[in-house]
């Protein structure tokens, strides 16, 4: 599914109308019909609140269909006396000729009438503002939305809850708190802002018939990952393959008190299918790790001589989990960057030590996948976490482009970007909110790269697989641990990629 800005949506509509000769009123009717297919038509009474733009036109068309179905319909139009869009006026004219109840909203008396009708209705339909909202909400508009939020039993918003900026998800002075939002054709960019979630309610994206060629042409190069993409990009096994076929993964992880990080990265890489896995850890914990990680090899990273001979033969190197934000971690990372020109996956303390010498990223000759959570991203940029969360796509995309890396910014709806294309991961849930999950993800991504997947697609596939396993396990479990994810990697991958 594509993710689009309001400008892209406008261009999409314009192309379909002007280049394909699709009448705008027909496109509006498609949206109206799809909306009606997705609401509860067993209810008998509806209050519909309309603006005077095309979102209002949708609202009035919905009112027409409900009236024809014999429902009790109250229509209220904000500043009805003012001019509206062409298609809004067309639907208003039809509705007036049908004798529908229509009342304007311009003063306190109108608001009182509105309140009574909301109280007497089972469903309220919000059609005040759509994706084109570009002004502050005040006066009668503010009071109307306040009246909706205080009195509606069940609110359904058309395309976007009124008061939400569809581009950045910011909330205006006030916004409609919908129980459901039925949005058209594409996922709105602003819906990725966590602050918008409490206003969206149950979100449904419905196809209103805009051809895919138009959607793709006008998209912002952003989309949700889907199962089809995973199946197409996954490195299927060759029946003649051997352990050398599936690559050599080197992992630098762990320190005293953090042996679990080293173990989980290594074990996740093994379970995902890497041919040979070697974990370099701190000398104080190597013997303990070698007993636990009996399907992989181990070494130590305390001196350069201990690992440099292995560097050249690696298909991929993962670096950082559980190593500590210290001089040794930075020294090892610096050495690797000077010795190696393959693909490097940097996570956790590997990201933290980059604060000292961020230009390593630009100077590195190979590919880099960076997997920060919002706190690590904020520290790396010297900004507040709330700034990262306000614009996760923009922050990740700009950093990736500036430094020539792939960024996987963790969180609900993980962002993966190479600075041009953006994929948003739809899998994963809060049952997975526990230690070791990031280490497990790093292991999965590292393993996929080892098996020949390019760094960008490995990040996309890794995030999806990791979250998919968590989703499947959480169907029967209140919480899901990192070790449970690791244990289920082989069978869940098999399940995921099966046609």
Image: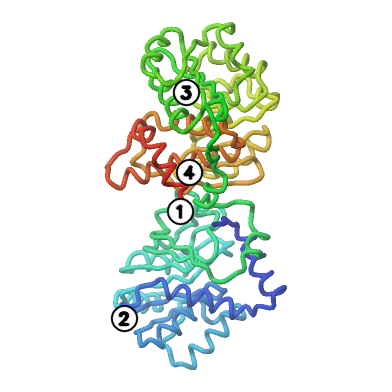
- Which of pointers 1 and 3 lies earlier in the amino acid sequence? 1
Q: Position of residue 59 (x, y in %)?
A: 48, 76
Q: Is residue 141 above or below residue 434?
A: below
- Which of pointers 2 and 4 lies earlier in the amino acid sequence? 2
- Which of pointers 3 and 4 lies earlier in the amino acid sequence? 3
Disc 3 secondary structure class? loop
Count neighbours of disc 2 (C-alpha within 10 A) and say few if under 14, some if 14 to 19, many if 20 or more. Answer: some
Report the residue marked by disc 4. 464
- Callouts 2 and 4 close, C-beta under 8 Å: no
Count neighbours of disc 1 (C-alpha within 10 A) and say few if under 14, some if 14 to 19, many if 20 or more. Answer: many
Count neighbours of disc 3 (C-alpha within 10 A) and say few if under 14, some if 14 to 19, many if 20 or more. Answer: many
- Callouts 3 and 4 close, C-beta under 8 Å: no
Is 284 or 198 nearer to us in this picture?
284
User: Would you identify the image quadrant in which residue 154 lies?
Assistant: bottom left
Q: Is residue 80 left or right of residue 495?
A: right
The residues bearing labels 3 and 4 have C-alpha atoms spaced at a distance of 20 Å
Closer to the eye: label 2 or 4: 4
Closer to the eye: label 1 or 3: 3
The residues bearing labels 2 and 4 have C-alpha atoms spaced at a distance of 42 Å
Disc 4 secondary structure class? helix
Residue 321 tag number: 3
Closer to the eye: label 4 or 1: 4
Report the residue marked by disc 1. 196
Residue 137 seen by the camera: yes
Query: In what quadrant of the picture does the N terminus appear?
Result: bottom right
Is 295 or 150 nearer to us in this picture?
295
User: Would you identify the image quadrant in which residue 436 lies?
Assistant: top left
- Callouts 4 and 1 close, C-beta under 8 Å: no
Q: Is residue 22 above or below residue 456?
A: below
- Callouts 3 and 2 close, C-beta under 8 Å: no
Closer to the eye: label 2 or 1: 2
């Amino acid at each position: 599914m594509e993710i689009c800005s309001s400008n892209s949506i406008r261009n999409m509509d314009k192309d379909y109308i002007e280049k394909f000769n699709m009448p705008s009123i027909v496109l509006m009717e498609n949206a109206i019909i799809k909306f009606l297919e997705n609401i509860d038509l067993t209810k008998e009474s509806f209050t519909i609140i309309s603006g005077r733009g095309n979102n209002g036109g949708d609202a009035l068309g919905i009112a027409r269909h409900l009236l024809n179905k014999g429902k009790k319909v109250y229509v209220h139009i904000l500043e009805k006396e003012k001019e509206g869009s062409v298609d809004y006026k067309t639907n208003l004219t039809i509705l007036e000729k049908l004798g529908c109840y229509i009342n304007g909203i311009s003063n306190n008396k109108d608001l009182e009438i509105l309140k009574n009708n909301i109280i007497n209705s089972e469903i309220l339909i919000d059609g005040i503002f759509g994706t084109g909202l570009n002004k502050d909400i005040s006066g009668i508009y503010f009071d109307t939305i306040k009246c909706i939020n205080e009195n509606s039993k069940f609110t359904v918003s058309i395309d976007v809850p009124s008061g939400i900026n569809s581009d950045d998800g910011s909330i205006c002075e006030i916004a409609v708190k919908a129980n459901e939002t039925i949005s058209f054709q594409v996922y709105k960019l602003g819906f990725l802002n966590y602050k918008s979630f409490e206003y969206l309610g149950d979100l449904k994206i419905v196809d209103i018939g805009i051809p895919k060629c138009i959607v793709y042409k006008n998209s912002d190069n952003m989309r949700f990952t889907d199962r089809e993409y995973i199946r197409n990009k996954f490195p299927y096994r060759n029946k003649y393959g051997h352990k050398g076929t599936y690559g050599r993964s080197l992992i630098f992880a762990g320190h005293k008190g953090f042996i679990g990080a080293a173990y989980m990265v290594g074990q996740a890489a093994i379970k995902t299918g890497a041919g040979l896995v070697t974990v370099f850890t701190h000398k104080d914990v190597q013997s303990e790790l070698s007993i636990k990680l009996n399907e992989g090899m181990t070494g130590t990273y305390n001196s350069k001589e201990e690992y440099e001979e292995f560097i050249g033969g690696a298909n991929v190197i993962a670096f950082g989990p559980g190593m500590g934000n210290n001089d040794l971690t930075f020294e090892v990372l610096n050495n690797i960057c000077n010795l190696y020109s393959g693909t490097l996956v940097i996570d956790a303390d590997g990201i933290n030590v980059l604060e000292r010498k961020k230009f390593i990223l630009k100077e590195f000759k190979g590919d880099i996948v960076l997997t920060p959570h919002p706190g690590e991203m904020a520290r790396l940029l010297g900004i507040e976490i709330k700034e990262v969360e306000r614009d996760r796509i923009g922050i990740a995309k700009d950093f990736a482009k500036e430094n020539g890396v792939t960024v996987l910014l963790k969180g609900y709806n993980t962002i993966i970007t190479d600075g041009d294309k953006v994929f948003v991961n739809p899998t994963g849930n809060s049952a997975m909110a526990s230690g070791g999950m990031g280490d497990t993800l790093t292991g999965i991504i590292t393993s996929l790269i080892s098996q020949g997947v390019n760094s960008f697609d490995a990040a996309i596939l890794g995030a999806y697989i990791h979250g998919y396993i968590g989703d499947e396990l959480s169907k029967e479990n209140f919480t899901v641990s990192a070790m449970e994810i690791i244990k289920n990697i082989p069978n869940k991958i098999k399940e995921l990629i099966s046609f």
